[in-house]
Amino acid sequence: MKIAALQLSTLPMSEAKLDYYFRICKQKEVEVVLLSEYALNSFFKELETMPVSMIKEQSNHKIEALKKLCAEYNLHVIAPIVNVKGDFCYKSNAHFSPKSVHFFDQQFLINYKHWNEEKFFANAIAKYTLPLFLYGGLRFGIVSGYELHFDLVWQEVMRKNVDVVLSATSSTFDSAKRWEELLKMRAMLNNVYILRANRVGSYKEDETWQFYGQSALISPYGEVEVSLGDKEEMIVATIDKDVLAEARKLWGWKKHVSKRENA
């Protein structure tokens, strides 16, 4: 199966740019597309000062545009979005298919002094459940960028036999090398593909927050198969079921876990 990662800064209200990239996806027979974090909405630090009504208008406009485009191009698109309910904002991932849209609230939120999503968003704190969907004989798990750090998440990835982890991020500062090593380790120890779509562009406060891109597909062997630079662009890559099977047979991590679960 061919899948794509589209690394973007915040999109304009017009659907022209998405239409352009989705037409390319159709031509290249891509079936699943991942958008980077804060592509459909303004970056978090900007959201903090925006009226909820404006955030809602921004989100609703993008939701309607993606519904239309996914139906037109027969695509499954995973996209982080702010889901507004009443006076409250929820940080979510949306799964757009040609016929429907489903929302999954992010379950681990950044809570640092300079970047406190946990305080801003109304997401519930509850038992973790891994968002999943099955398509084309593959099991896709949706893991938000911050959630990649937690072992609990990866226990569910292995337990639920996920084949491909889709992760949208907005990584910045000097974290590029750390992120690459994290993704390689997680992919290898779980024998999964990881597709990461990282934000590009910048946000200026007292200092400039530079989002560096470097979106990548990591193989089940923990190797970077393809990666991008620091500008707006798109990965088109192939998910190979035979590679998944070979890696799992070679390393056998799942067998060890299953033995102890059933002991």
Image (cartoon, grey):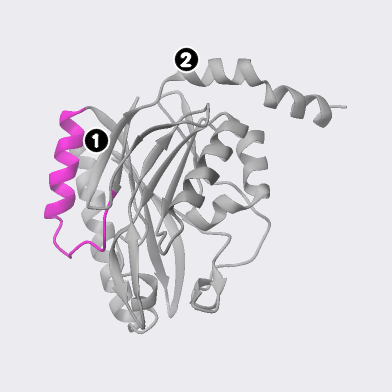
Q: Could you tell which of marks 1 and 2 lies nearer the N-terminus?
A: 1
- Residue 218 lies in quadrant: top left
Q: Is residue 160 visible?
A: no
Q: Which residue is tagged 1?
A: 74
Q: Does the magenta stretch include residue 33?
A: no
Q: Which amino acid does label 1 sit on?
A: Asn
Q: Which residue is drawn at 26% across and 31% down?
A: 30
Residue segment shown in magenta: 7-28
Q: Which residue is drawn at 40% across and 66% down?
A: 83
| Image quarter of the N terminus | top left
In the rendered view, tell whether residue 20 sits above or below residue 193.
Answer: below
Disc 1 secondary structure class: loop
Pick the residue in front: 44 or 95. Answer: 44
Q: Is residue 103 left or right of residue 74?
A: right
**Mark 1 → mark 2, Cα distance in angstroms:** 25 Å
Q: Residue at x 54, y 78 (%)?
A: 119
- Residue 258 lies in quadrant: top right
**Disc number at residue 242?**
2
Give coordinates of residue 201: x percent, y percent: 26, 63
Q: Which amino acid does label 2 sit on?
A: Asp
Give coordinates of residue 3: x percent, y percent: 33, 33
Badge 1 vs badge 2, beta-carbon distance below 8 Å: no
**Disc number at residue 14?**
none
In the rendered view, tell whether residue 54 sits above or below residue 169.
Answer: below
Give coordinates of residue 137: x percent, y percent: 45, 23
Give coordinates of residue 147: x percent, y percent: 56, 54
